[in-house]
């Protein structure tokens, strides 16, 4: 004799805080590499951004009349702040991190109703707002100055850089690969002329180049991403389709005219493609609900990235691409719907196998 | 007909106003309770487009204010002659005439401001707040009340423009009423203030998205104040 038990019959022992902890864990190696590569200012910026994101989330929760402690405890504000910090210029002044954290949690999430209600990825919304508002500070990159080498600023000198803007910019700035080739194109030169100086495939895999705090290390980011896929925190379709679409587009056009179009290696390794593929485009709140929908979403991201990098005014485009596709997410979800349990995709009941059910 | 009360948003005019005079109620409606921008949410296009500085906001606000007052007076005076089927074309014609006057006057005497505001001066014709007030108030009330209503609605609109422009200019470039002397004439030069010297500027607030964000913040703030006031009265 069997006993009647109400569903759900199988429960996965996961919760929002546990998921967010996994994401943070996966982001740690790439972030640690970024801190090592760009020195203490990067660590200060990370801490400021996280503190500001938590403060902004606390204010939003309070204004919405929700419990502050459990709202902060779910870790979503921490993840938003962390990913924002990963995408900032490592030696950015403290107010970039402070304003960015507030923008991400208050403007990116709080005004829409908090965790799970935001139409746009909070970290990318904040990054784009910062880029538009402070173009100079948001596009000043430093050459790698690993901790322990002579170029690396000490703890106190780093404080001066982050809080007083005391960096000797003329000595330390360096163009990113995408910046250098964008400049070459606007000056009428070919990409090949600027590329050898600005891009070394072996170093790019490791992430040893100028760029955002933790966007560089393709290897460590991909390792974190694969870990997240293995733990089923993120779906596999989004990163795979995004990277594959971008690679196909880049390879095709590169074959047509290598002087004008980057090859797939540059598109995947330079800039923040890998970070976006594994950590940003996979945000469950702002990406479609079905696997097919997520594939469309990721392909759209990749196409936008390629188009803006090739023809647009900005050298890098992952943040814009993700925001644009976030805006399309409701449309995609309307177009590709999940199958209702017990029914076909068209909505008719599945045959039960019995004559008279 | 003259004594009927025709507010477009009945909820905003509590009937329990008691001894409150007609004039007081018109003033309260126009300036706060039924504010063109914050409650009726009309005329948002010129509002968002020109409020990158407080001076521009004040300039467009004053131009619109004049059209609102004059159109209310004229339309109210002619309300017995305008029949229902032709009222919309006639109202538009009257408003367009007044706007053309303002347009020519500003081109002649306030040329800098005229150039800064550009298309938005002729576009006052299509400002739905003006036609809206003409339709629901001026064409149903005697001239004195209609003119006063136009004045109060116009002041409410000007206030919203100046506050929004002020916030955006202050955050965006650290000044208030910059170039007021050049744009509005030397008498207004005293308005120019540099609030934050050596300010690098939060560019976002001057750009279009900043207009939407600041307007949303102001609307939320007004609702919060209204809710507090209601809670106190209850």
Image: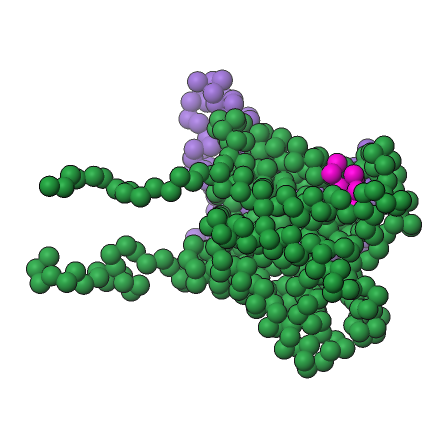
**A1 horizontally vs B63: left or right:** left
Q: Quadrant of the C terminus of chain A?
A: bottom left
Q: Where is residue B162? Give x, y as percent.
A: 70, 38
Front-lying residue, A326 or A238: A238
Does A39 appear in magenta? yes
**A215 horizontally vs A58: left or right:** right
Quadrant in which residue A182 is drawn: bottom right
One can see residue B150 in this view:
no
Front-lying residue, A341 or A223: A223
Q: Where is residue B164? Give x, y as percent.
A: 67, 39
Write down the colour of chain A: green
Q: Where is residue B17? Give x, y as percent.
A: 46, 22
One can see residue A281 in this view:
yes
Magenta residues, start to end: A38-44
Write down the colour of chain B: purple
Q: Is residue A236 above or below residue B62?
A: below
Q: Where is residue A5? Give x, y as percent.
A: 20, 39
Give the residue furthest to the front. Answer: A148
Q: What's the colour scheme?
A: by chain
Total marks in image: 0
């Amino acid at each position: 004799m069997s006993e009647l038990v109400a569903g759900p019959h199988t429960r996965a022992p996961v919760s929002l805080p546990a998921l967010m902890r996994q994401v943070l864990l996966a982001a740690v190696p790439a972030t640690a590499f970024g801190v090592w590569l760009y020195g203490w200012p990067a660590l200060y910026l990370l801490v400021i951004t996280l503190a500001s994101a938590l403060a902004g989330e606390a204010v939003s929760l309070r204004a919405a009349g929700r419990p502050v402690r459990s709202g902060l405890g779910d870790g979503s504000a921490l993840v938003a702040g962390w990913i924002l910090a990963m995408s900032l210029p490592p030696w950015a002044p403290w107010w970039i991190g402070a304003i960015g954290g507030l923008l991400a949690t208050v403007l990116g999430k709080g005004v829409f109703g908090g965790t799970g209600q935001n139409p746009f990825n909070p970290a990318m919304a904040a990054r784009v707002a910062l880029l538009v508002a402070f173009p100079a500070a948001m596009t000043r990159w430093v050459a790698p100055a690993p901790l322990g080498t002579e170029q690396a600023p000490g703890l106190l000198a780093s404080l001066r850089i982050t809080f007083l803007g005391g960096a000797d910019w003329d000595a330390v700035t360096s163009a990113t690969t995408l910046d250098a080739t964008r400049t070459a194109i606007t000056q009428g030169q070919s990409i090949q002329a600027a590329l050898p100086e600005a891009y070394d495939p072996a170093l790019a895999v490791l992430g040893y180049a100028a760029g955002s705090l933790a966007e560089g290390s393709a290897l460590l980011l991909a390792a974190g991403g694969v870990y997240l896929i293995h733990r089923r925190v993120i779906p596999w379709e989004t990163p795979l389709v995004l990277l594959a679409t971008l690679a196909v587009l880049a390879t095709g056009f590169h074959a047509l005219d290598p002087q004008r179009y980057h090859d797939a290696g540059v598109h995947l390794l330079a800039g923040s493609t890998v970070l976006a593929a594994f950590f940003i485009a996979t945000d469950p709140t702002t990406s479609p609900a079905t696997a097919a929908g997520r594939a469309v979403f990721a392909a759209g991201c990749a196409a936008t990235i390629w188009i803006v990098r090739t023809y647009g005014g900005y050298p890098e485009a992952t943040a814009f691409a993700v925001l644009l596709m976030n805006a399309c997410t409701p449309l995609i979800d309307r177009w590709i719907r999940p199958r209702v349990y017990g029914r076909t995709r068209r909505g008719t009941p599945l045959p039960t196998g019995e004559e008279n059910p | 007909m003259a004594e009927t009360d025709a507010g477009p948003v009945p909820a905003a005019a509590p009937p329990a106003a008691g001894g409150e005079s007609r004039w007081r109620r018109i003033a309260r409606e126009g300036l706060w309770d039924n504010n063109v921008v914050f409650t009726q949410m009309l005329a948002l296009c010129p509002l968002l487009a020109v409020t990158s500085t407080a001076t521009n906001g004040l300039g467009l606000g004053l131009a619109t204010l004049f059209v609102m007052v004059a159109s209310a007076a004229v339309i109210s005076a002619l309300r017995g002659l305008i029949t229902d089927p032709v009222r919309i074309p006639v109202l538009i014609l009257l408003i367009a005439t007044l706007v053309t006057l303002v347009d020519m006057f500003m081109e002649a005497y306030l040329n800098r401001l005229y150039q800064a505001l550009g298309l938005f001066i002729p576009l006052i014709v299509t400002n739905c707040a003006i036609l809206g007030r003409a339709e629901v108030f001026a064409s149903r009330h005697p001239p004195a009340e209609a003119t006063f209503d136009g004045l109060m609605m116009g002041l409410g609109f000007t206030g919203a423009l100046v506050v929004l422009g002020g916030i955006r200019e202050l955050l965006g470039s650290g000044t208030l009423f910059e170039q007021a002397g050049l744009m509005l004439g030397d008498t207004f030069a005293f308005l120019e203030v540099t609030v934050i010297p050596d300010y690098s500027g939060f560019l976002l607030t001057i750009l279009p998205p900043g207009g939407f964000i600041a307007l949303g913040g102001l609307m939320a703030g007004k609702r919060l104040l209204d809710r507090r006031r209601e809670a106190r009265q209850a």
